[in-house]
Amino acid sequence: MRTWPNGLALHCERRVSVKVIGVCVFSLNKNTSLTTIAMWRKLLSSVPAFRAPKAPCRSFKSSSRRAEKDFNKDLEAQFRAFREKAAAAMPGSDWSPFELTPGLPPERADVVIVGGGVVGWAIAYWLKRKERVRDGLRVLVVEKDPTYSQASTVLSCGGIRQQFSLEENIHLSMTSADFLKNINNHLWVVNEEPVDLQFNHSGYLFLASEKSAHIMEENYLTQRHAGAKVALLSPSRLKERFPWINTDGVALASLGLENEGWFDPWSLLNALRRKAVSMGVYQCFGEVTGFRYSSNVAEITDGDFVDVKRIKYVNVQMPNSLEYQPVESAVVVNAAGANSGKIAAMLGIGLGPEESISGIPFPVEPRKRFVYVVHCPDGPGLDTPFLIDSSGVYCRREGLGGNYLTGMSPEETEEPDVSNLDVDYEFFQEKVWPRLANRIPAFEQLKVSSAWAGFYDYNTFDQNGIVGLHPLVPNMYFATGFSGHGLQQSPAVGLAVAELILDGGYKTVNLSAFDLKRIFLREPMLERNIV
């Protein structure tokens, strides 16, 4: 051992092998000066163990000045990194010897949104947009699928329309259409590319048989009264406008003239997420596996007693791990789409006695739907609207290369297995193609290019959205069950839920009719003649 000024001690050991290796153990503190570092340079050059081994063609002495400078820079960088680590490990620092799991959610949030689909991110965006004090509201979005490979949002056809029979659905889609047309006024982020939804304004075209024509006329009056721009077409006018359609069996048609068509779902999801994160929303990829809550017994009508729960913590399990993070939260939003019924069951909703309110199950479950991509060079072409036939089959153009998307919903008794996302091509051959080719004869010559399957968050009660608080869990809001309409209505639904949470009521679109009360009272809100 050799002792040097400034209290530094050097222990050197020489080991002989193929190369001569010097081992140096030294102790420093964070205040080690540059003078001391210079002394170490001199020391290292004087100890044979630290001299570079001779290369076959040249020695260290013959190396360039640049190599020597690089060596000195590297040495200084190592000293600097050592000092930083030493300072971080001192008392009072936040250094820990244990490696933390990346992506853990914060330990506390004001609002936890379960579900990172387009509805969940729309709610997060509007919550931050409406906060009165910057960073005054901590919002966390939890999504279990980091790849979004099974997300209903990105597996949809991307359609938007105002042709509904319920005014609530018409106003939701009109408000959302206005949002989408002015997307960059809402979702543009500084120093990022403008949002391009690839919005195609080709409209929706509904066809009605003689049996349902009167319902289409009634819907038309409701839509016009609500402000939607639609037109009714007789079979002759329909044939004149779209000569490629076979009008046999068509008594009346309804065409959307404005704010209808389709757009890219992935672009909307990414734009909402990017903007919300830029505004301070936290995102976490993990699965909600349970809740911690307080419980109180409350008396309701007829002397019945129910268990009322208030959520305190949301348990979030990390992907591919047994580790979970409890997140303390004042408000929870169930926007889990097809999985929202499973989330509700974690709180005992629907698991009580059948005759009580706690025994009424939350009526949302996954339903699998197939989307087929077909190629037909001689198909309808660029003027193809989003066609909804009276038989239930639909079709729209996809791009400019002669491709089209098509499909239909199966009968209630023929619902496919939801344990996977496998595609049933026989369903296309037996159910979809015959109906499609009957309405558009050119599709007799089509070829199936590809297909995929996705899940609806299907409301078995009345196939309409469920928005609002659950009386047995007074701090859990629901925004789910849209049964295929969630994507097109998401901007307006997000705004409505944010108003409900922060303002205590609806201000833009009144969705009181979509409250859970209708389920408890057995009063469904059904659409007429609409898929």
Image (cartoon, grey):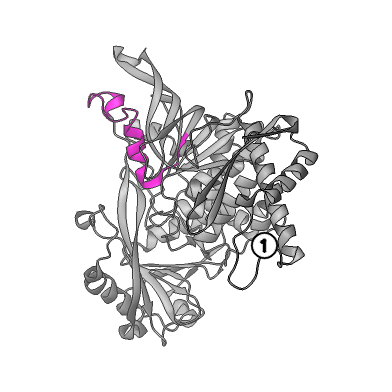
Q: Position of residue 118 (x, y in %)?
A: 50, 50
Please name the amino acid that badge 1 sits on.
Answer: Glu
> Is residue 347 visible in the rendered structure shown here?
yes
Q: Residue at x 43, y 30 (%)?
A: 314
Question: In this picture, which residue range is highlighted in magenta?
Answer: 333-359
Q: Position of residue 157 (x, y in %)?
A: 43, 63
Is residue 426 found left or right of 443 in the rendered image?
Answer: left
Q: What kind of element bears circle 1? A: loop
Q: Position of residue 36 (x, y in %)?
A: 76, 39
Q: Residue at x 27, y 71 (%)?
A: 428
> Is residue 175 visible in the rendered structure shown here?
no
Q: Which residue is mark 1?
A: 193
Residue 379 vs 361, above or below: the answer is: below
* Quarter that holds the C terminus: bottom left
Toward the viewer: 170 or 448?
A: 448
The stretch drawn in magenta includes residue 350: yes
Q: Position of residue 391 (x, y in %)?
A: 30, 67
Is residue 178 found left or right of 459 in the rendered image?
Answer: right
